């Protein structure tokens, strides 16, 4: 069993935020925005229990978007999925790092009830974390230097972001 | 903790780039509105404004321009309410907002600041706006944006405070260290406080290696 990573937006998942209108024990609706299914499936990545491949996954996720950004994610035990009766299948990811693509799976045949149960479980049990843009940039630089990431597959649109990356790579050289 | 508890005046001295922006405002308004559908409803008025802007420089024309920009800004924010935002992904809202700021400079910031700091705006949209504003590389509006991001730390909404925190992380300016320290002390949400500390750590670590481009006249 490994950990599963799902990309989220952290500020939708604050546990210590007091919402006066929310009945005790209930989950606000906004976290469900991070569990939007396509064909009743959800994309997740397998992270080893020692998290040794976490940074590589984060870096790869950060290059698969339009611009340099923070990466927020929920990290939870894979057994949580089986406890909820959710099915999981290996599938190839579509990120710039081929190894990371091998760590990809889909949760599938998801009903609305199961998605809600998953959201509650993530809220209760997952570790929710963030890598800031500068941290992400450093991780991407690491991956480029080690040859684990293909620069030509970085999807950023802004030249400014590439300039920041190049500057960092120059400093590292 | 409300925005009303915070200083409300911006103290941003006029610079050459500010003045240049103001003089070109009417012309830019005319030039840019034609390519963006959301602005089309003001075309008829802009011709007149362009004329006044070039000849009379009257306060009436400035007021009219300001009103039109306010209308455009409101339209941009109103249209964003149904969007779902994802970190690192462009949205119609982010494209419209960036285009608006780059086109109209300080005047655009004057139009959007009261909207973002308003209690009435959708907090998800306000938070996204602050992220976008922090990521933008635009010298002309740098100080307005820094001011707005610092002010956003005082928002009653945790989500807006987080947007401001991310925006400041992107700006990476040590000038934000003190405002962030105060924000950390005020912050009741543990997770957000930790994120603020992380950004604080970044800014303190970068005191001597500031890399982002910024307004040279600051």
Image (cartoon, grey):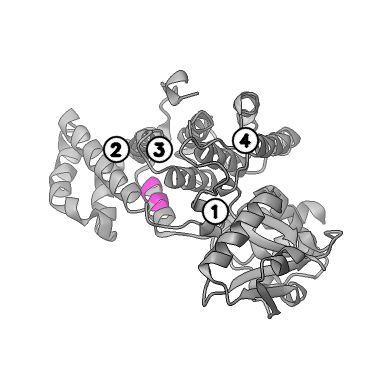
Of tags 2 and 3, the one toward the viewer is: 3
Q: Is-magenta flag for residue B100?
A: yes
Secondary structure mainly formed by the magenta segment: helix
Q: Can residue A43 be seen here?
A: yes
- The tag earlier along the polypeptide, 4 or 2, is 2
Which mark is drawn over residue A31? 1
Q: Residue B144 occupies which quadrant of the picture? A: top left
On screen, residue A118 above or below B200 = below
Q: Residues within 10 Å of mark 2 (few under 14, many from 20)?
A: few
**Badge 3 element:** helix
Identify the image quadrant of the N terminus of chain A.
Answer: bottom right
* Residue placed under numbered mark 3 in the picture: B116
Q: Residues within 10 Å of mark 1 (few under 14, many from 20)?
A: many
The residue positioned 52% from the left and 65% from the top of the image is A36
* Residue placed under numbered mark 2 in the picture: B23
**Badge 1 element:** helix
The answer to whether marks 3 and 4 mark residues whose Cβ atoms lie closer than 8 Å is: no
Q: Give the spatial CA distance, label 4 vs label 2.
A: 29 Å
The residue positioned 40% from the left and 54% from the top of the image is B93
Highlighted magenta segment, given as a residue range: B97-101
Image location of residue B214, percent across then percent down: 56, 39
**Badge 2 element:** helix
**Given the image, what chain letter belongs to the residue carrying mark 3?**
B
Of tags 3 and 4, the one toward the viewer is: 3
Q: Give the spatial CA distance, label 1 vs label 3.
A: 22 Å
Q: Residues within 10 Å of mark 3 (few under 14, many from 20)?
A: many
Q: Residues within 10 Å of mark 4 (few under 14, many from 20)?
A: some
The answer to whether marks 2 and 3 mark residues whose Cβ atoms lie closer than 8 Å is: no
């Amino acid at each position: 069993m490994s950990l599963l990573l799902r990309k989220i937006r952290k500020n939708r998942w604050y546990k210590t935020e007091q919402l006066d209108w929310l009945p005790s024990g209930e989950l606000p609706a906004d976290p469900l925005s991070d569990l939007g299914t396509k064909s009743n499936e959800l994309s997740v990545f397998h992270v080893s229990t020692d998290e040794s491949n976490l940074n590589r996954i984060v870096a790869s996720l950060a290059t698969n978007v339009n611009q340099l950004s923070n990466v927020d994610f929920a990290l939870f035990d894979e057994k949580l999925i089986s406890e909820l009766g959710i099915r999981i299948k290996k599938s190839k990811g579509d990120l710039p790092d081929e190894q990371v693509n091998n760590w990809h799976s889909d949760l599938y045949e998801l009903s609305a009830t199961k998605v809600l149960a998953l959201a509650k479980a993530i809220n209760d049990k997952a570790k929710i974390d963030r890598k800031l843009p500068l941290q992400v940039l450093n991780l991407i630089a690491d991956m480029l230097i080690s040859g684990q990431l293909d620069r030509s597959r970085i999807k950023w649109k802004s030249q400014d972001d590439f300039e920041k990356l190049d500057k960092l790579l120059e400093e590292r050289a | 903790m409300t925005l009303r508890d915070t200083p409300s005046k911006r103290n941003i001295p006029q610079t050459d780039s500010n003045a240049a922006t103001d003089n070109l405002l009417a012309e830019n308004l005319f030039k840019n509105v034609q390519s963006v559908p959301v602005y089309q409803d003001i075309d008829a008025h802009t011709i007149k404004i362009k004329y006044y802007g070039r000849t009379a420089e009257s306060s009436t024309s400035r007021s009219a321009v300001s009103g039109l920009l306010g209308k455009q800004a409101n339209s941009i924010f109103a249209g964003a309410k149904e969007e779902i935002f994802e970190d690192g992904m462009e949205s119609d809202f982010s494209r419209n907002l960036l285009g608006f700021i780059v086109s109209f400079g300080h005047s655009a910031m004057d139009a959007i600041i009261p909207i973002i700091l308003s209690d009435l705006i959708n907090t998800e949209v306000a938070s996204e706006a602050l992220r976008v504003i922090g990521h933008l590389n635009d010298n002309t509006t740098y100080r307005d944006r820094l001011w707005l991001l610092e002010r956003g730390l005082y928002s009653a909404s945790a989500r807006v405070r987080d947007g401001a925190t991310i925006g400041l992380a992107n700006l990476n300016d040590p000038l934000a260290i003190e405002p962030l320290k105060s924000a950390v002390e005020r912050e009741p949400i543990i997770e957000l406080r930790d994120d603020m500390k992380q950004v604080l750590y970044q800014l303190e670590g970068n005191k001597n290696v500031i890399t982002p481009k910024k307004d040279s006249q600051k």
